[in-house]
Amino acid sequence: MSLSRETAETVALRALAWLVGNENLLPVFLGATGASESDLRARAADAEFLGSVLDFVMMDDAWVVAFCDGAGLAYEQPMMARAALPGGGEVHWT
């Protein structure tokens, strides 16, 4: 099952809100991406940026679990949302 782009963006925005509310993880995200706090506001409607938010959250299973548990989402939702955003298609190495 796939998600619509609108639904994927909503999941990613919820992930961004979760990150912003996480005082321990937000600085890690900012450091890893080079984004500033003002970038978070300015780029919240940018589908490519939202994809990077999901990429970051999916780096650690514990983060996925914490986000999904807090948001009431199934654990596969971030992956499904990422696939529906720009750059989220599966990579085929053949």
Image (cartoon, helix red, strand yellow):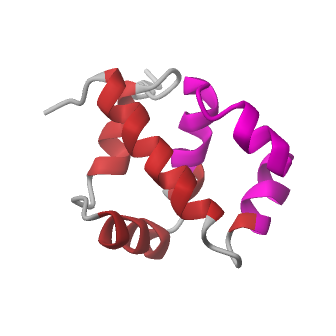
Whether residue 35 is visible, yes or no, is no
Q: Toward which corner of the image does residue 83 lie, by quadrant?
A: top left
Q: Quadrant of the N terminus?
A: top left
Whether residue 45 is visible, yes or no, is yes
Q: Position of residue 90 (x, y in %)?
A: 39, 28
Q: Toward which corner of the image does residue 4 lie, by quadrant?
A: top left
Q: Quadrant of the C terminus?
A: top left
Question: With respect to residue 1, does 14 lie above or below?
Answer: below
Question: With respect to residue 49, does 31 lie above or below?
Answer: below
The residue that appears at 70% across and 76% down in the rendered structure is 23
Q: Position of residue 26 (x, y in %)?
A: 71, 65
Q: Position of residue 65 (x, y in %)?
A: 37, 72
Q: Which residues are magenta?
A: 27-55
Question: With respect to residue 42, does 57 lie above or below?
Answer: below
Magenta span: predominant SS is: helix
**Is 34 contained in the magenta span?**
yes
Side (left or right) of 32 relative to 87 = right
**The furthest residue to the left:** 1
Q: Position of residue 36 (x, y in %)?
A: 86, 48
Q: How many marks?
A: 0
**Is 59 contained in the magenta span?**
no
